[in-house]
Amino acid sequence: MIRHLLTADGLDGETVNTVLDTADTLKRTLLGREVRKLPTLRGRTVITMFYENSTRTRVSFEVAGKWMSADVINVSASGSSTGKGESLRDTALTLSAAGADCVILRHGASGAPHRLAEWLDHTGTKVVNAGDGTHEHPTQALLDAATLRERLGELAGRRIGIVGDLLHSRVARSNVHLLRTLGAEVVLIAPPTLVPEGVESWGATVTHELDPQLPGLDAVMGLRVQAERMNGGFFPTAREYSIGYGLSAARTAKLPEHAVVLHPGPMLRGMEIAPQVADSPRAAVEQQVRNGVHVRMAVLYHLLAGEESTA
Amino acid sequence: MASRQSADAAVPAGERELLSAGDVARTVARMAHQIIEKTALDSGAEHVVLLGVPTRGVPLAHRIAERIATFSGVTVPSGALDITLYRDDLRQQPNRPLEPSSVPAEGVDDALVVLVDDVLFSGRTVRSALDALRDQGRPRAVQLAVLVDRGHRELPIRADYVGKNVPTARSEDVAVRLTEVDEADAVLLRRPDTSSSQHTGDHSSSAATDPAESAGGNQ
């Protein structure tokens, strides 16, 4: 099993399926229970370090840890010693020394969790990437895969479209790797200005036209347009983007009957996704959030429950 | 499965058969009769639920339920209760896969729950099962049925229904084989020199091979 969860790239199919199966079992274990609390990670300390804003990811990790009885402590960049000029490395070593068994990091710099894992390697503290810059967001890809598996069954041979701001999206990159590992085919759809360099190496089809793809997709995932990372004009107006790439009711009507609409959130309603689509039964947005908790429980279980590896 | 040689032979060297396939069937039948009698099942006063502890407790629970239905005409719901998430030795062993739990839809509230496992050894599995059960609801009472009680309890736990009491050495290994999981029904006693230590019938402790100073309590 893995020591840290840093990327979806490089996770083998067996590991992915083990995590997804564990998440599924945990979900069914807790279903309909009055007391949603398992003693599994009692005495383990999980610290979330969020250097970027987040609602669902942070809450999801915190709930996941607490439902398994871990002690979860949240540290944010504002309000911590980072504001006094402490480096990421020193902050991490401090948290590890204070007793963290696992550090969950969200950071604006791509690769930050990787560095953290190197710095903490001698301490035994595990690192989970909760989103780093425009690089990866592996637990998001896992929860998307869990949701798609629930809706569609096996993902091998399925065709999944990912549409929107690919350039700034860590969700897209993680999803491409993970979905391909599970045998699905991925189509990336974005305006030319929002396609990242080197995308050819991802192993997915890239196109700029959404409409012709719709009838052949088993699922379509809308990405958030990341205005906070955009320092130039990537498209003329939000309205024009919406006309070309927004998931409107008219568009989703062209999808096959069984096709699922996903969005990692936060959604910009009316622009990336029409409200009536976001609230329709084919949208799985809330299911994604629910699965996020179980997937993160599964990740924490696999990283923290077993015996201490001496490797 | 990992027997060194002659894996197909009926009883390899270093193993002794405690119960044959026929004995297993008779023992299960007797346990079913005892449950009917002790819970006064025919009177209908008690809502009885059988919950097996994975792996082999589950088919055992189903078999006992089937026998009870045959003997008494009363249908007793049976299910599975996975205890992995409640174990007190998680940190002493590599990660374990979770088994699905399937508690009958009626739930366990106010029921007489009979936990079913293959081997009763240290009692730690049963302790974990009691914790897991507490999170499922509030049974009126909980009883324990085991196919083999091999002694060496580490906790104040005893079984209400015992298929066979077997005095064993700690270093020995009791292996229950059921066709739902294995190739045949049997209960085998293995000597340490030939047995592979992995196959302890009991879930709670591989202390069978090494009474490691493990876990006086939790952690």
Image (cartoon, rainbow, N blue to C red):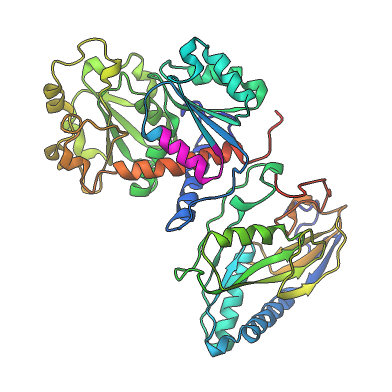
x then y, percent, for residue A251: 15, 37
Residue A249 shows in the view = yes
Is A289 above or below relative to A132? Answer: below
Q: Quadrant of the N terminus of chain B?
A: bottom right
x then y, percent, for residue B105: 44, 68
x then y, percent, for residue A303: 58, 36
Q: Which residues are magenta?
A: A58-71
Q: Residue at x 61, y 21 (%)?
A: A120
Using the image as rendered, state which of residue A200 and residue A128 is in the foreground: A128
Magenta residue check for B140: no
Is A183 above or below relative to A117? Answer: below
Q: Residue at x 72, y 71 (%)?
A: B159
Using the image as rendered, state which of residue A278 and residue B139 is in the foreground: B139
Q: Residue at x 43, y 56 (%)?
A: A31
Using the image as rendered, state which of residue B139 and residue B187 is in the foreground: B139
Q: Quadrant of the C terminus of chain B?
A: top right
Residue A195 shows in the view = no
To which quarter of the image does residue A208 belong?
A: top left
To which quarter of the image does residue A278 belong?
A: top left
